[in-house]
Amino acid sequence: MNHKESLSRPAFAEQIKVWAAELGFQQAGIAGIELARDEQHLLAWLKRQRHGEMQYMERHGTRRSRPADLVGGTVSVISVRMDYLPAETQQPEALLEQPEMAYISRYALGRDYHKVVRNRLQKLADRIHAAVGEYGYRVFSDSAPVLEKPLARNAGLGWIGKHTNVINKNAGSWFFLGEIYTDLPLHADQAAAEHCGTCRTCIDVCPTQAIVAPFELDARRCISYLTIELKGAIPMEFRKAIGNRIYGCDDCQLYCPWNKFARPTAEKDFAPRHGLDNVQLTTLFEWSEAHWLKKTAGSAIRRIGYERWLRNIAVALGNAPTSPDTVAALRQRADDPSALVREHVAWALAEHGAA
């Protein structure tokens, strides 16, 4: 048996999964690189302009759906998942019912997952190198044009739900994905079957009706897009629906029946930092830029910048109960140097009859 034949045997694939578990991943699987059907879905989504201002989605084109075009020589993809649901002081559903409090997507409460997942993947790649010698590979964690959800599905990690997130029948959907593209001819797993059935909870609970049909998301309506990706003013039609969500949205996962199987992560890096899982909007609105930079060091929140942070909180304060503290906090930013912030503060003050 030659070297390539030994790599393609199921036993070596199983060894990779053991190493992945030892490095803190909850599951690993192996997929091939055939994504033709998913490519058609991607191109149709782009044609409908459902990516909004995320021009990089269009710019990368089919490199996202053709792994060998992104990394030459790729024939296999190792896909992994890492749980991130943090143990918190109160249930996130309860937090959404307290409009004076800030809601931050659960994935962003701790350390930036890109670094955590990528570093572990590099260690996994190093273990493979120790076993097989020199080989071609590249590690990813939401850091390049990778069609990671279909790859995870094909690797057996879960199916793509109606909300377009990956769901695992034993663990729900609160997990990060990562990949190793490699030129090793590894034994591929069987793709996961879809188990959403007739359930449409995620569609019904979405505050902005962003899930326009089962398995179809219009990012332009999604609160995660509006609070993170969108650089300009948040459209008026969505401001009330945003509620107290100042960075991302979890509703489609919070109410998904499969997440009854989710368990809080033991990963310390994903534990909430600086009390961001239980903090008032007015407190966060008082942060200076220097203080914000200090508090968000090593956090995924950094990517939106201080201006969009204030924009988002202004909208949430506009949705908060009218009180002297809320109005006072907004008035302190009424003359903010940023026109974007001023515009959203003016809207919020008008909502409280205090323009």
Image: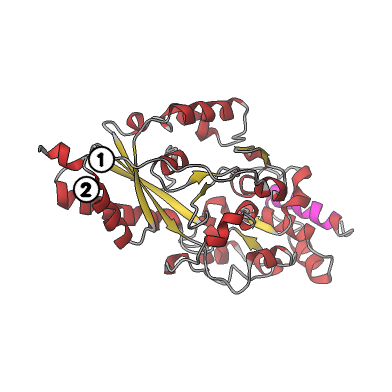
Stretch of the chain drawn in magenta? 337-350
User: Residue at label 2?
Assistant: 12
Amino acid under label 2? Phe
Tell me, what colour scheme is on the image? secondary structure
On screen, residue 283 versus residue 270, left or right, reads right
Q: Which residue is mark 1?
A: 186
Indicate the quadrant containing the C terminus: top left, top right, bottom left or bottom right.
bottom right
Report if residue 90 lies within the magenta region.
Answer: no
349 or 61, which lies in front?
Answer: 61
The answer to whether the residue labelled 2 contacts the one labelled 1, judged by CB atoms less than 8 Å apart, is: yes
The N terminus is located in which quarter? top left
Residue 285 in view: no
**Residue sitting farthest toward the right:** 353
SS of the residue under disc 1: loop
Q: Position of residue 319 (x, y in %)?
A: 78, 58
Q: Is residue 341 magenta?
A: yes
- The answer to whether 126 is drawn above or below residue 297 in the figure is above
Compute the Cα span from label 2 to label 1. 8 Å
Pick out the residue farthest to the left: 1
Q: Visible in this render: residue 57?
A: yes
Mark 1 nearby-residue class (10 Å; few <14, some 14–19, many ≥20): many
